[in-house]
Amino acid sequence: MDVEDKYLFFEGSEKKAEIVVKGQQFSLLDDIADDFWTELVQCCNAQILSSIRNDDCKAFLLSESSLFVWRDRLLILTCGNTRLVHSVEFFIQKIGMDKIQQVIYQRKNEYFSHAQPSSFGDDIKLLGQYVSGKAYRFGELDSHHNYIFHQDNSFQADKLDKTYELLAYQISQRASEKLTTKGLKAEEIRQFLQLDELFSDFALDDFVFDPFGYSVNGIRGKEYFTIHVTPQASSSYVSIESNINLIKLASNFLVILAPQSFDLLSFNEFDFARLTDEFIPKSYVSKSLVNEHLSNNYSVCFANYILPQQAFTQATALDLAGENHAL
Amino acid sequence: MDVEDKYLFFEGSEKKAEIVVKGQQFSLLDDIADDFWTELVQCCNAQILSSIRNDDCKAFLLSESSLFVWRDRLLILTCGNTRLVHSVEFFIQKIGMDKIQQVIYQRKNEYFSHAQPSSFGDDIKLLGQYVSGKAYRFGELDSHHNYIFHQDNSFQADKLDKTYELLAYQISQRASEKLTTKGLKAEEIRQFLQLDELFSDFALDDFVFDPFGYSVNGIRGKEYFTIHVTPQASSSYVSIESNINLIKLASNFLVILAPQSFDLLSFNEFDFARLTDEFIPKSYVSKSLVNEHLSNNYSVCFANYILPQQAFTQATALDLAGENHAL
């Protein structure tokens, strides 16, 4: 894949893993040296770019997305052609399953799934060597969907342990052009995304990729958010993940990004239906609506929304001179 | 892939090729022996099951979809893991580009694109060795879309040369259960699909696959239709293609199949907007709406419709004991 293709067809869609350890035995935040995390992210071909920390959390910005470490758990998201399951395998081998309470591995439908080094089936086959679990698909195969695998043991998630994902696809031409502007500074992107208003008092760590692309981690006590922007037209994608309520913030992001489609995913948001009814603009129509209570006590909701089209657009002409690896 | 997986995760989505020859020089219908077609379909790992013909057209039912041959053109559709472009290459090598007026190669988004032997990019790279052309994508990358490659030369399609495709995804549980009934006879499927009413006076040739799946070709003079049914829940798919107006028949099929989503594709239907407004039930919402006039004088319209969801459904539990090749 030549350089141009790499940026024209970058796979923004993340794989995600969350691992909860037996916190009374040791602290991931205090007892593990940074070398360990460096090696862990290298296992999926990512690198640590920078990090911030407070008393409760350390947030690493990666060449492909983010890693968050708290005392009793870690959360890692990686995009592009990384094979995240190898980092999970590294963690399990180094730390040992006897110190692990719960492994959750998640993967969403990709733009270019045929260009990925593995499928979800491949990944959980590998995980199955270490972890006995269950797997689900949220959403139909022919549209946006999320695969979730989780360890099936006595672990029960706290009902207050909430997570939210807002995944925006096909952002507006205006947003795409702004975010692909050459030489754009991090400060300008923070302003464009209104981060200071929407996540006030969070410590931020961000990075502008060359020629474009943006990642930011934010932490405030145990709270976190992370945003990853793949702004290029035709495969634009913005992922926002947080343990603060993104459904309440959704309308702000929908105004800023004006995506043609977006997904909402929540863990243990028991008020999902009421909140989406209150906060999602009626211009969007719900295509998928899935809820499942997992045996690890996470109630997971998934919704995909689309913007109905009224007018015809032109087809997208493809560049046959290029390598077209991602077609 | 074991037998069960093969049927649980069968890729119904077709690749399609249409080739127009210089009809004054020879007739594909009369001057080419059946052995040639047998060999041609073997090139993409399909087989001829049966055939019917009239004075204008010969229709072959294949182990993976269909082949139609008229005097001046052929149309071939293949599903599953066939690599149709190899049949196109065979035709070009045997007949010669000097006798060919136009090559069109089309491929829609697949359910399991990572399990395909090639991508559209791979296919047109191979075709590019023989044919100079243009390629387009109709529809967004993150939702249903069609790739179309066509030869770019002096060929101009007749404005009356119309083709229609109606592609139904996620048919109702009722339709899926009916069409996966063990021992179902062809006659029962014809009745269920109301073929006698909707395509009266067509000569039919059909086949019921084991354990399920159904293909039918119909011809009446130069008119044709072909329907392929992949009925299994979770990846159900019914494709209908014809040169008679399927937009006018759409509401019938939507009542029979009740799909959660469907695509309409037309070549040279200049009344697409008015017809869809008149014949598509308002319960469906248009997600994509694309129109492009190709330089070969085909005006192509693509629309994807979805049924908005009001109620939550459960997630789909995945069988981890199986091979999960298609996940």
Image (tube, coloured by chain):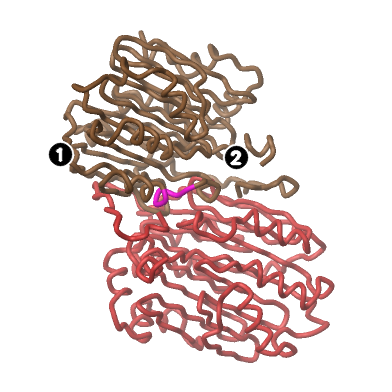
Chain colours: A red, B brown
Residue B196 vs A21, above or below: the answer is above
Give, as a three-letter code, the residue at label 1. Ser
Q: Is residue A56 above or below residue B144?
A: below
Q: Position of residue A327 (x, y in %)?
A: 40, 54
Which x, y percent locates residue B281? 35, 32
Q: Nearer the viewer, residue B30 or A273?
A: B30
Q: Quadrant of residue A261?
A: bottom left
| Residue B142 sits inside the magenta stretch | no
Label 2, label 1: how far apart the Cα atoms are: 42 Å
Determine which of the numbered discs, if any, sits on residue B154 in the image: 1
Q: Please, what is the three-letter code of the amino acid marked with disc 2?
A: Phe
Residue B120 is covered by the magenta coloring: yes
Main SS, magenta residues: helix
Q: Nearer the viewer, residue A288 or B91?
A: B91
Report if residue A130 is visible in the image: yes
- B36 or B123: nearer the viewer: B36
Query: Badge 1 local density, few (<14 within 10 Å), some, or many (20+)?
Result: few
Residue appearing at x 33%, y 48% in the figure:
B129
Is residue A271 something one can see in this rendering?
A: no
Residue B143 in picture, x, y percent from top left: 42, 50
Q: Is residue B260 above or below residue B190?
A: below
Q: Residues within 10 Å of mark 2 (few under 14, many from 20)?
A: many
* Disc 2 element: loop
Residue shown at 35% from the left, 54% from the top: A283
Q: Is residue A56 left or right of residue A312?
A: right
* Residues drawn in magenta: B118-122
Residue at the (51%, 46%) spot, across then down: B117
